[in-house]
Amino acid sequence: MTLTSDAPARTRAERPLKQVHLAAHFPGVNNTTVWRDNSTAASQIAFSSFKHFAQNAEKGKFDFLFLAEGLRLREHKGLIHDLDVVGRPNTLAVLAGIAAVTSHIGLVGTLSSTFNEPYELARQLSSLDHLSGGRAGWNIVTTFDAFHGENFRRGKFLDGADRYARAEEFVAVARQLWDAWSPDAIAADKAGGDFLAEDAIGLVDHHGPQFDVTGFPTLPQSPQGRPVIVQAGDSADGRGFASRTAEVIFSRHAKFEDGQKFYTDVKGRLAAVGRHRDSLKILPAATFILGDTEQEARERSRETALLQVSPQTAIAFLEQVWGTDLGGYDPDGPLPDIDPVSTDQGVTRGRVRHDSDPAAIARGWRALAEAEGLSIRDLVIRFAATHTFVGTPVHVAETINRHVQEDASDGFVIVGSSNPTGLDEFVDRVIPELQERGVYRTEYEEGATLRRTLGLPV
Ligand SMILES: Cc1cc2nc3c(=O)[nH]c(=O)nc-3n(C[C@H](O)[C@H](O)[C@H](O)COP(=O)(O)O)c2cc1C
């Protein structure tokens, strides 16, 4: 099926119910995974954790499992940030392992276009697609800062302005590599006659500002031809890149109005590049807390938030904005009355920053804390541990469905608060509610690739 931009747009009232698409985010690369509670916490690295997480997500018929990537342990005040989850195994090795213990769920890994090379990465992703029967996806991030660059002998390596130029050329080269083996020629060869590589495999001969690649790729086209392309940057350049390239956006716009604004913006860019609205799915990250009653869910949400934001975490979070040591402040007291230190680097290294004006953030936070009587810890909970969906399973399912039907998203990347059992309750209690409403699959389609599972043009 090929969707073109000529298809008439249908109003929301005219179209059939949209299907909800869900991804399962393996906790890691953050400091809000609850690891102090021995009844729920297990290893971030052991294969048994990945296996449980993946098999549970597959039981819940999730579209794909998602791994974030951190190429360097974060540091805080010159030391490894010991409030962070530590342990970040190689993405592709983990996904290859998971491929062997699952059979339908998509396998999406976050991999940097700045610190990889297209020939090697295209080959690895193609291998994953072959090994998994067409379930591979690539979340392209541009991870460009000097801190990560030090691990790769290139220092800063790329200015912000160049990172999407490199990402764009990276994808263009990868596509040539994925497309180089002609399926028709290979089929003809297989049907009889000799295998004539020069007829079946096109030479990739790319010369551009970022890459020179000349050679024959080592693999035939994988089941999907190309892995599903996911993107997670949020700047204007990032959104432009996504509209030209991505099939899924992992966004941070999970709130209803904000989600609708982002959805309208990005989907609105597609026609200009000749793409249909349905060729790109938008899945914001979302957390959840369930309860038998709304009251119980709210209480659990508060308890979980207090575990996610310890007194030390609250101070460290503030220090990331203030850029200076705030160890003398009481986490249960008011916000610091001093202004943030103006520095490019601050005290935290390795964290993705979405806001660039610490003084403005501090002013806004102080005003909010004063207006609502929030302590440092309360304020940090508000920003770092406010759960997206809190309520009974019915309430959460209905809220998710409303976001999808009213174009605030096409679904969500669900992030649990513990590992590896953090999504078990969601699968057991929320998924059946979505299924009952006819907006979520009850079975995977046999033999479907990830692209097909996602309802993308194949
Ligand atoms: C929801 C979300 C998740 C992200 N996850 C990762 C990640 O796991 N690893 C990483 O290196 N960068 C991650 N990023 C960073 C982005 O891919 C990108 O490099 C960064 O946001 C800068 O691009 P931008 O200026 O377009 O936002 C994430 C960004 C967003 C919005």
Image: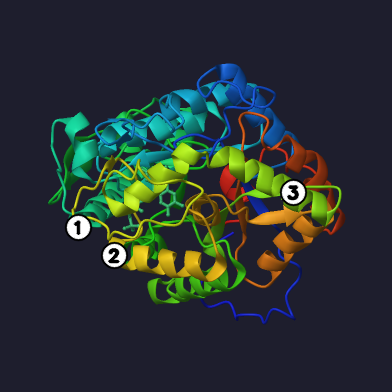
- Badge 1 amino acid: Ser
Q: Quadrant of residue 196?
A: top left
- Badge 3 amino acid: Glu
- Quarter of the image with the N terminus in it: bottom right
Q: Which mark is residue 368?
A: none
Q: From mark 2 to mark 3, how far is it between C-alphas?
A: 33 Å
Under tag 2, what secondary structure? helix
Taking the image as shown, residue 30 lies to the left or right of residue 77, namely right
On screen, 63 above or below 3? above
Q: From mark 2 to mark 1, how far is it between C-alphas?
A: 8 Å
Q: Is mark 2 within 8 Å of ligand 1?
A: no
Percent across and percent down for residue 241 are: 34, 61
Percent across and percent down for residue 405 are: 70, 69
> Would residue 319 be visible to someone looking at this image?
yes
Q: From mark 3 to mark 1, how far is it between C-alphas?
A: 38 Å
Label 3 with label 1: CB-CB less than 8 Å: no
Q: Which residue is mark 1?
A: 342
Q: Residue at x 67, y 73 (%)?
A: 406
Q: Quadrant of residue 328?
A: top left
Q: Residue at x 54, y 17 (%)?
A: 46
> Would residue 276 be visible to someone looking at this image?
no
Q: Which mark is residue 359?
A: 2
On screen, 269 above or below 117? below
- Badge 2 amino acid: Ala
Percent across and percent down for residue 336 are: 36, 56
Under tag 1, what secondary structure? loop
Q: Residue at x 68, y 28 (%)?
A: 55
Q: Which mark is residue 299?
A: 3
Q: Earlier in the sequence, mark 2 or mark 1?
A: 1
